Image (spheres, rainbow, N blue to C red):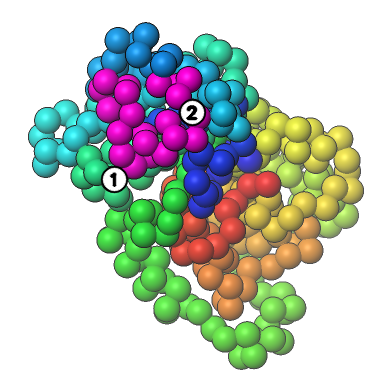
Amino acid sequence: MPLEIIRNDITKVQADAIVNAANPTLLGGGGVDGAIHRAAGPELLAECRTLGGCAVGQAKITKGYRLPAKYVIHTVGPIWQGGSKNEEKLLTDCYRNSLALAKEYQLESIAFPLISAGAYGYPKDQALKVAITVIGEFLLKNEMTVYLVIYDRASFQLSEKLFASITQYIDDRYVEVHEIRRELFAVEAPTPVQQRKRNLEDLMEQLDETFSQMLLRLIDEKGLTDAETYKKANIDRKLFSKIRNNIDYKPSKPTVLAFAIALELTLDETKDLLRKAGFALSPSSKFDLIVEFFIAEGNYNIFEINEALFAFGQNLLGV
């Protein structure tokens, strides 16, 4: 998928480039910076000495040497000073300039740490919001695989308000499996209002549609292009081509829900699309309830949804 949040040691990530949260000298330090220099070997330090340092918010590129990555993109994040010293813009610049370098070098994949969220003291939830926003905006216009590498769960935090809202939504609706076993396979009866909204003739015409046919019809009805759709769905272009070219393609549930989000479907429309692929939303699934929460809130930003899914230990939407 174009943006994937993973738990790993960034020095072990297989990508064309990894991003180093460096200090202005580019001569190594603690945390991620020190780990990358140790893993890359002394040749990295020797090349960094030729670069003349790096300003906060800017980015410079070197070879990866002994790392699995071909390149290291060094960027200097801001030190948190309460938020009044232009920290957000500087952190935004770190991500934008790093991505611009990756694009200039025609890289297909890049891995970021959560810049400035360690020793530099940037609040983790705010640092995460900047990262997701900038990377998400970039991927809506560009083809690249981006990894956001989280070393441990403690370093990944949603805003307290969002975390509490999702938790409350789950608590209000979560049902144990044994209580709903019969309901999982039942078709929900539409309300009178829903019945009026649904045109019987249209439903009959769509009865024999496969998932692929329904998806392509919905894309046309929403006035979207293929590229707009798969990018908003956090779906790889190659996978979308398979779906378009195979009328009987069988997608995974996260893929179906990713397209529902990209198309900004209502909850009922989402359930219809899921049924075409042989799935249903379940009140015993936290994954389902989190996605349902965002649909109910009218928030169709797939990157923010995946951010929440990761925080709750769930699979991500997309491939």
From the viewer's perspective, tell me whether residue 174 is left or right of residue 280: left
In the foreground, 81 or 66: 66
- Crowding at label 1, few (<14), some or many (≥20) Cα neighbours within 10 Å? some
User: Image height check: is 85 above or below 316?
Assistant: above
Which of discs 1 and 2 lies nearer the camera? The answer is 2
Of all residues, the one furthest to the bottom in this rendering is: 179
Which image quarter: residue 160? bottom left
**Disc number placed over residue 60 in the picture, else none:** none
Instruction: Tell me the residue at 88%/43% (across/down).
Output: 247
Residue type at the position of mark 1: Gly
Which residue, given by chain and number where applicable, does mark 2 sit on?
41
Q: Do the residues labelled 1 and 2 touch (CB within 8 Å)?
A: no
Which residue is pictured at 39% across the width and 71% down the height? 167
| Side (left or right) of 304 relative to 258 | left
Image spot of residue 284 (x, y percent): 58, 78
239 vs 199: above or below: above
What range of the chain is rendered magenta?
Answer: 22-45
Residue 169 appears anywhere in the view: yes
Q: Decide if residue 86 is on the left or right side of residue 208.
A: left
Residue type of the residue flagged with mark 2: Gly
In magenta stretch: residue 138: no
The spot of residue 220 in percent (x, y) is 69, 34
Does residue 33 show up magenta in the picture?
Answer: yes
Picture layout, residue 83 above or below residue 108 = below
On screen, 259 above or below 222? below
Residue positioned 66% across, 75% down in the render = 188
Residue 106: % across, % down: 59, 15
Frontmost residue, 30 versus 174: 30
For the point 35% across and 63% down, the residue is 163
Choose the circle earlier in sequence order: 1 or 2. 2
Q: Which residue carries the number 1 mark? A: 118
